[in-house]
Image (cartoon, coloured by chain):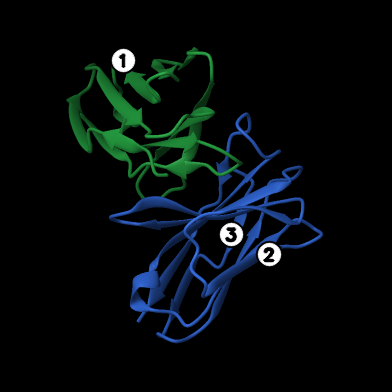
Chain colours: A green, B blue
């Protein structure tokens, strides 16, 4: 089951904040977040496991609400290097990680 | 560099043909995943192997098959190719299967079917 990401695209000025949401219709074991720059492979950002934990990676953090089957990625004080497409990957059962269609983020000077 | 190696980088072939994509996982990783990426569908999970055994199947067509060899490298075979199979195919690897292991992606093989 492919998770649903919103918004589809975001344009920010450097220093602004953004939130990317990921939701599933099924119960989640975990949520992964990856960033893919144009022409490159997706790169791992963080994993969130059951328990509503919040993780951080520099100025990028995320939350996981297992009851709502949702996760959100928070980008604060965005930098030009944050530009790319962000994917959430969800594990519902078994071992497969299914990814959303991605959220395109462009940070402008 | 993720440590995952995919070959070839580009493939151009005609409809009806068969191709093989190859993936060498990061040293120490036992799990290999194959994903197809097209513009409108994002990253679609195809199949996963763990230590030589198939562990999960996604939206993999019957014309496609894969295997993981004893040395842990994996091959994805695509046959009777159609124009719609044109896409970027990624291989990813992880230490183990399950929630706790991040995926490390290779640089992908871009397949163009003409």
> For this view, does A72 lie left or right of residue A94?
left
* Image quadrant where residue B20 sits: bottom right
Q: Are marks 2 and 3 in contact (CB under 8 Å)?
A: no
Residue A87 spot, x, y in % from top left:
39, 38
Q: Which mark is residue A76?
A: 1
Judging by the rendered image, the residue that carries numbered circle 3 is: B6
Please give the chain letter of the residue carrying mark 2.
Answer: B
Q: Are marks 2 and 1 in contact (CB under 8 Å)?
A: no
* Image quadrant where residue A36 sits: top left
Residue B97 spot, x, y in % from top left:
67, 40
Q: Please, is residue B35 above or below residue A89 in the view?
A: below
In whole angstroms, how far apart are the C-alphas of marks 1 and 3?
A: 34 Å
Q: How many neighbours does mark 1 have within 10 angstroms: few (below 14), some (14-19), or many (20 or more)?
A: some
Q: Are marks 1 and 3 on the same chain?
A: no
Residue B16 spot, x, y in % from top left:
44, 87
In whole angstroms, how far apart are the C-alphas of marks 2 and 3?
A: 15 Å
Q: Are marks 2 and 3 on the same chain?
A: yes
> For this view, does A79 lie left or right of residue A87?
left
| Quadrant housing the N terminus of chain B | top right
Mark found first going from the N terminus, 2 or 3: 3
Q: Nearer the viewer, residue A105 or A68?
A: A68
Q: How many neighbours does mark 2 have within 10 angstroms: few (below 14), some (14-19), or many (20 or more)?
A: some
Q: Please, is residue B11 above or below residue A33 in the view?
A: below
Please give the chain letter of the residue carrying mark 1.
Answer: A
Q: Nearer the viewer, residue B70 or B25?
A: B70
Q: Please, is residue A3 above or below residue B17 in the view?
A: above
Q: Is residue A109 visible?
A: no
Q: Residue at x 40, y 71 (%)?
A: B85
Judging by the rendered image, the residue that carries numbered circle 2 is: B67
Callout 2: SS: strand
Point out the frontmost of discs 2 and 1. 2
Q: Please, is residue A30 above or below residue A61 in the view?
A: below
């Amino acid at each position: 089951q492919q998770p649903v990401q919103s918004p589809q695209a975001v344009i920010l000025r450097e220093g602004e904040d953004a939130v990317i949401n990921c939701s599933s219709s099924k119960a989640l074991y975990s949520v992964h977040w990856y960033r893919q720059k144009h022409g490159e492979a997706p790169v791992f950002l963080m994993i969130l496991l059951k328990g509503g934990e919040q993780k951080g990676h520099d100025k990028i953090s995320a939350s996981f609400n297992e009851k709502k089957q949702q996760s959100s990625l928070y980008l604060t004080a965005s930098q030009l290097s944050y530009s790319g497409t962000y994917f959430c990957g969800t594990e519902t059962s078994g071992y497969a990680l299914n990814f959303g269609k991605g959220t395109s983020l462009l940070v402008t000077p | 560099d993720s440590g995952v190696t995919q070959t070839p980088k580009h493939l151009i072939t005609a409809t009806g043909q068969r191709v093989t994509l190859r993936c060498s996982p990061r040293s120490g990783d036992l799990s290999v995943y194959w994903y197809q990426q097209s513009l409108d569908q994002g990253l679609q999970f195809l199949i996963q192997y763990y230590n030589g055994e198939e562990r999960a199947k996604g939206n993999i067509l019957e014309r496609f098959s894969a295997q993981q060899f004893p040395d842990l490298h994996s091959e994805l075979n695509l046959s009777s190719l159609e124009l719609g199979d044109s896409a970027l195919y990624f291989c990813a690897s992880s230490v183990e299967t399950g929630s706790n292991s991040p995926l490390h992606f290779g640089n992908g093989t871009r397949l163009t079917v003409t």
